Amino acid sequence: DLLSSSVWRDKLPIFVAGLLAGAMFSGVITGALGGLASPLPSWLRLGVLAPALTVILAFELAGKPLSLVQNRRLVPQTVIPDNQVRGPLQFGFEMGTGVRTFVPTALPHALILLVVLFGGLGPGLLAGLGFGLGRALMPTARQYSGDPQGWDSAMLGSMTRIGRTSAVGFLLCLAVLFLP
């Protein structure tokens, strides 16, 4: 794993900065697209959102997350030789956008749909920040766990529970947003 190598251990803050920058960039784009959907009546936007969220959340809660369109390459080979600043920053940015690397759940797609249909620039930025922080949590926790290989095993064994917990959290946020 690229981030566990001794060359990159001291580069985690640079990688995380790239993650957050990439996620915020995606958030701005998503938020700007949200402005385009705002003239549509809310019943129409809700009519598009509700079935999509129902399918995504049902699969997540069942422990079988949907595999939506994504790039499944984990580490761009072009950044491996650059172990200074550019490599971890570039890889972090690309991973932060969510379009360069593997995403193990469809919940980010649900969030994008929600922001595009009901958000705007502010919600887009917040969604980007949340996505970036979520992505940064994993390599940070792994690095400081004291046992990266054990952490990997525990993480793989917990993916279904983490997905279900994330789906419940998403549902609770929807309730806060949409219930009076």
Image (tube, rainbow, N blue to C red):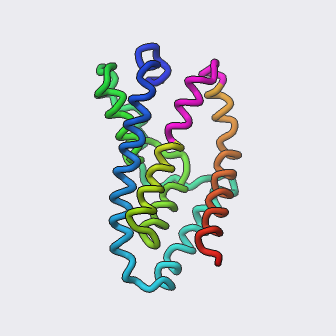
Helix, strand or loop: magenta stretch: helix
Q: Position of residue 162 (x, y in %)?
A: 66, 45
162 or 145: which is nearer to us? 145
Q: Is residue 41 above or below residue 97?
A: below
Q: Is residue 57 left or right of residue 91?
A: right
Quarter where residue 89 is shown? top left
66 or 174: which is nearer to us? 174
Q: Which residues are magenta?
A: 135-150
Q: Position of residue 158 (x, y in %)?
A: 69, 39
Q: Position of residue 57 (x, y in %)?
A: 62, 62
**In which quadrant of the rendered image does the C terminus lie?**
bottom right
**Which residue is outermost to the top?**
6
Q: Is residue 121 magenta?
A: no
Which residue appears at 47% of the width and 79% of the height? Answer: 45
Which residue appears at 58% of the width and 62% of the height? Answer: 56
Q: Is residue 20 above or below residue 6?
A: below
Q: Is residue 11 left or right of residue 110?
A: left
Q: Is residue 147 magenta?
A: yes
Which residue appears at 55% of the width and 24% of the height? Answer: 143
Q: Is residue 12 above or below residue 97?
A: above
Q: Position of residue 109 (x, y in %)?
A: 48, 58
